[in-house]
Amino acid sequence: MIGRVEDALVRFSRRKGDRARPASPLLVELLQASDGELVESYPNGLFRCEIRRGAVGSGKEATLYDTVPVIGGESLALLRGAVQRICETLSPEQVKPLTFARLVEVLEQMAARELSRIRDMGLVRELSRLAAFEAVGLPTVFALSRDRNVQEFFVDSASSPVYLDHAKHGRCETQIFLTERERRALETHMDTFKGYTLDYANPSLKNEFDVFGTTLRVSLDLDPLSVSGFSLDVRKLTSNALSLDDLVVMDVLSAEAAAFLLAMLEAGVNVTIVGETGTGKTTLLNALDEALDPRLRRVYIEDAVETKDLLERGYHQMKLRVDPFERAGGAQRTKSAEITKILHRSPDLVVLGEIQSEEHSRAFFQALAAGVRGLQTFHSSSPEQAVRRWLELHGVSRANLLDLGLLVQMVRPERLAARRCVESISAVAGRPVPGESPEPSLHRLYLREAGSPLRRTGAWEELGIPLPSFRRAAFLSDLEEKIEKARSPRQREAAR
């Protein structure tokens, strides 16, 4: 592992003998504005982000995203010189421990020294950070990750432009292309700093990169899996993370529903968030996790770490990183193996991230049967489809489904728009069958009709909340108080 990291550092350092070779253009020299009607413009460090309406290659009207440099000529010359010098002088001995974060930190410090003649310390900081990512070959990743409105961006092939999901404007097209150097840098850093090998037999990998406080989940697919030879998906995990209050103000869910979910989790009811890709499942999971009592002992089992780091705020968090699902054939630290061991870690709440496979599902329901409760996400278009998938594809017994607790459905009403919301909250309860075991059935507790807010579907006593009867009365009394406390400040904020 160390040898591979050192080799990577050497490859990405420009040797002094290469000075005669023309330097690659910097990102700020490649970016340009598109044509189209300007809709919005806002600053983003060394760049200005512009949203326009215009035609794309297919001729269709689309939302266009530009990131335009705002660096003066003198600063650009200093930046170019700093990038060249830090590439020439970097040595593996300077980067200890040998991690991607430490590599970027060292390069940023080196660049800051090169740029010390600039008196504006804020400008020095921004230029040195860009210089560090220019040196490692990932300037486009840096620029897009710094925009708090960019939630996820994609590349379909080596010759395709970047397109992205914007928090306000939804799906946006761009004129930004990854250079060959950037594509090779992604492959190298994904391979080097994860501890796995990208090769013909294992052409797919996920990793997390930290960009000065913003955590990115990077998914890379290469030949032969990717037909085009190169496909990229970069999701932003922690930048501009939304709280439960934020989600209420945005009408992702109501104040009452938010208080209800928290009360159910505190009462030891399992909550599974279901929905299609990009509907905001992980955002809601993080918001609920953050809003729960910090004293609860949380145990997380994830392959890509998508949960918030709350340790510095006094929360009790034990996080376990397992091998990616995509590498199950050679995996040694699997999610299912850690799920089966979870009771030995004495959790109050277990956060499993995404339940992906039949193996995950079987281990998940085994943990539920042993009394483990917590938060997780599952891909499906509806609660009913989730139940069918577990029953028919993953071989889970009907009796085990009775341990599910609540299913929260997230949706994206318009596929390319920015809005995400909770469409329903359902309880999994047992329907009596004469002479047989109870049949699992779904009861809608909250439902969002088209164009309406999320509303409770009936009186509490009629809803079949999955709690023991001897606890239900006290729980409902406490819940009404929680809802009243939650509603007032959130509604005042929403009305501003």
Image: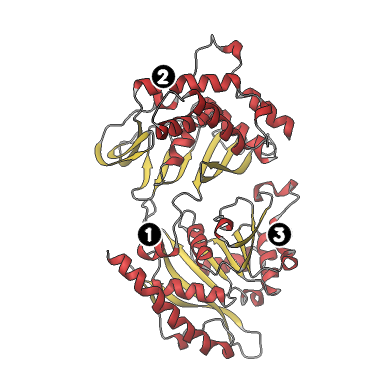
Q: Sequence-wise, which precedes: disc 2 or disc 1?
A: 2
Q: Position of residue 223 (x, y in %)?
A: 61, 34
> What is the three-letter code of the residue carrying label 1?
Pro
- Give the SS element for disc 1: loop
Q: Sequence-wise, which precedes: disc 2 or disc 3?
A: 2
Residue 295 against residue 434 in the figure, above or below: above
Q: Residue sitting at 27 percent across and 32 percent down?
A: 35
Q: In this view, does 230 lie to the left or right of 337?
A: left
> What is the three-letter code of the residue carrying label 3?
Ser
Q: Quadrant of the C terminus?
A: bottom left
Query: Dot 2: within a 10 Å radius of its alpha carbon, few (fewer than 14), some, or many (20 or more) residues?
Result: few
Residue 255 against residue 139 in the figure, above or below: below
Q: Name the residue under label 3.
A: 336
The image's mark for residue 77 is: 2
Q: Sequence-wise, which precedes: disc 1 or disc 3?
A: 3
Question: Decide: marks 1, 3 in contact (CB < 8 A)?
Answer: no
- Give the SS element for disc 2: helix
Q: Where is residue 431 in the image (x, y as percent from the top left)?
A: 57, 84
Q: Name the residue under label 1.
A: 413
Q: How far apart are marks 2 and 1 (CA)?
A: 47 Å
Q: Distance between the residues labelled 1 and 3?
A: 33 Å
- Give the SS element for disc 3: helix
Q: Where is residue 229 in the image (x, y as percent from the top left)?
A: 57, 33
